[in-house]
Amino acid sequence: MRLERLSIGGFGRLPAGRKLEFAPGLNLVLAPNERGKTTLSQLIAGLFYGFGPRKGGVHPFEPWTGGDTGGELIYRLDSGQIFALSRHLDKRETVTLRDQAGREVALNGNQPGELHLGLGQGSFLTVARIGLDDLQQALYAGGAGKELETTRQWLSGYFFSEAATRGEVANPVSVRQAWSAEREKLYADDRRKGAESKQLTERAAQATEALAAALQREEQARQARRDLEGLAAEDQKLSEQRRAAALAVQEAGKRLDQAKALARRSGLLAQIEDLQQQGLATEQDEAKARDLAGQAQAAHKRAQAAQAESKQAHAKAAELVPGGEPERLEARLRALQEMRSEFNASHRMQEAAESALARQARALREQWGLESAALAAIDGQLPHRVERLRGQAQEAAQAAEEAGRALEALPAPPAKPVWWLGLVFMALVAGGKIMFWAYLAQVPWWFWALGGGLAAGGLALLGFWLHRRGQNKLARQRLSEAQAALEQAQAKQATADQELSHTAESLPPVLRQSEALALSQALTEARRLEGEREAQARERAALEEKREALLAQAKQAAPQATGGMEAALEEMRQRARQAQDALAHARRQQEQAVREQDAANSLEQELARHLAALSLADLEALAQARERSRQADKLRAAAAEIEQGMDPAALLSTPAPEAAQQALEQAREALAALDREIQALAGRKGELAKELEHLGKSEPAAQAQARLGALAQEKADLARRHDALLVAETLLSRAMEEFRLEAQPGLLKKAGRYLAMATDGAYEWLGTDLFEAPAKGEPEIKARSGPGAPEREIAALSRGTRDQLYLCLRLALAQEITAQGEPLPLILDDPLVNFDAQRLAAALAMLCRVAEERQVILLTCHPHQARLLEERCTVNRIEI
């Protein structure tokens, strides 16, 4: 596998938008501190395996300048396939993997590193990414907890299987760890382990406690039985006291009843007197009313009984319908055939009726030009309403015509004689002046006569003008009235015509000119036809339901009937006759119910007439009047009964009700106190009985003793199993140590060759106690200068030598694990800072050798390492 191009979208201190081109062989990334070298290695690992969770809502590698978090990586597999891997962190992490054709590759829940590299995240960080901090541990990097343990088990199993039998036998590391885990489950000094031993000890302690509790419960049971015997004696004593108290209460109750009876007698006599003052009714009127009401009610009951008997007869007829028993199957088939014949006859009658209705509807359509349904939908009163409106319109037209003729017959009003007013004025003025001059001067008499004549003529003309003015006014008034009458008649005619037109629009055009009576009869006939059609439709539906029922019965009754046909047919005939008799009886009872109901209605009418003759609204008023009489009789009888039930001496010596009530309450309080004591005693007895029952259900002491013995035997068996596992684990550890010293895995041989190159031959052998390392610890690494030389513990080596040793081990691990699979690129994050000049040059030469086999990306902040590296091999230099 080879990385080709990395596009940084935004990740920590790395510059957003930067693209890094990687070449085959050795790539040198040179950058000062705090410029993102380590972040770059984490970005590459994160693209393959995920960026990890947020902490406090913020991701540790969100860009310092803000923006998108993520990037895209183009890589090529050893097979030549090119893939584009993109991962971004928005609200949630999204990852996309596409091939060189742009098609998206389905991950199916896996990470791209697991899909193409075949390694988990912990294994990838151990094999492919090596930093300075990683050189402080032998084989594990990039993880903790379960992930670290998974990586360790994978590596340790690989070491031993490769060195021993190439996986043909079980991994002794796993076997020994399984034995150790099983032994520690049985017993361990560590409180977090030895679960079975602790559980067994706890169970033994619980069994001991259970035995002590069982002994204590048996003693409690004996004491409870003694307490029950004492409570029984006390219960008998309280029962005797209660009987005496109950007799006292009974006696006090009798005295109180006598006192109350006397008080009730006085009240009854007062009520009788009050009822007599209100008035009482006669018994004859009530008897007659009650007789009528009783007869009506009896008639109702008889009607109801007849109706119920009719229903029972119908139910009996329904019960006589043949069932589906096998012995009656043949009879049912014959009955179904007969019912089928009846159905065919009904169907033919139905078709005949429908044909007749169709002929009638066709005749109606030919006569009126509309379907019967359309005619039936028309309002039956509409033709008469149209005819009435036509008459009103004609009457309004005649009234308008008469008003017009009357207006034309009126003479025109005469013209106003305005000029006559001038003549009147001139005559009056001239006569007045002549008479005035005649008065002032001596003139002949005829002068006076001339002036008087002129004045009289002017007055006469004035009277004539006033007369003509009145006639003119009267003529104009008559003309105005005639015009108003004409306008009113015309408006009435327009209203009638408009209403007639609006109403006629409700009729189809072919019916608007039809005669009302004929049209009304046609509408009635259409409604009748539609009603009969609906009835025929219901009958047809009923026939269809009957047909379906017959089919269902036929399918259910006798799909393959055989034998016993005559006897079964006779039985069904009898059932049919019985059913017919029951139905006939039901009809008779129904008719009887109708007659009884009519009789009840007649009696109720007679009762109403009787009550009306008595001036009473209903039976309640009569009952109230008569009730007063009966109540008075009852009161007298009650008073007499009270007197008979009491001794004559009690009438004189009975105490007041209040004193008797007080004595009764005292007796009852004493009885209640005894009842409370008895109830408390019963509760105590119940508690003791429950306690005895509970103690009886608990584990007996003998059973608890037996369980404790079984646990002791189980504990001895557990100790024997623990000792056997401890011996087996010790023997396997010795065998593994002997094998480790004799057979060195191929991985450690490759690491030794790399170590010889990096140390200029100072060390050339590596060993490890991976089999002996604790489950959560680091294995011990040892080195020696050659065969037969003493081993040196890693703690005795310098820091630079330890870094060289661990680096060589990681390089050998990467080469060994990926030898048969996809070659991984090596990402080295400044691992050479602790090397001296001689060993730094040797280590750089070694990296050049490694770069010939796989891609190497060296991240460093030291320019002199870059110069030394460029002197030894071809380097793709990248600066950040």
Image (cartoon, rainbow, N blue to C red):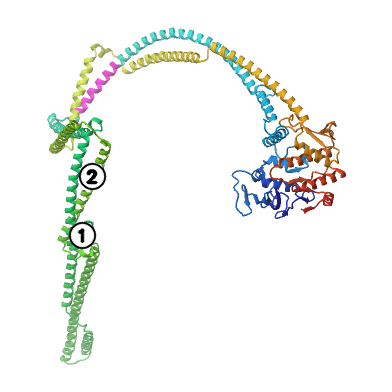
Q: In this view, does 382 lie to the left or right of 782?
A: left
Image position of 32 with respect to 805: above or below? below
- Circle 1 packing at 10 Å, graded few (<14), some (14-19), many (20+), is some
Front-most of residues 720 and 644: 720
Front-most of residues 242 and 635: 242
Q: Is mark 2 on a helix, strand or loop?
A: helix
Residue 712, image quadrant:
top right
Residue 665, image quadrant:
top left
Labelled disc at residue 382: 1
Q: Where is residue 645 drawn, in percent x and y?
A: 23, 15
Q: Is mark 1 on a helix, strand or loop?
A: helix
Residue bearing the label numbered 2: 542
- The residue under the point 25% across, 38% down is 554
Labelled disc at residue 626: none
Q: Where is residue 199 drawn, in percent x and y?
A: 62, 21
Look at the image and give the residue range highlighted in magenta: 257-276
- Give the residue type at disc 1: Leu
Q: Which of marks 1 and 2 is in front?
A: 2
On the question of residue 266 being in view, the answer is: yes
Front-most of residues 192 and 478: 192
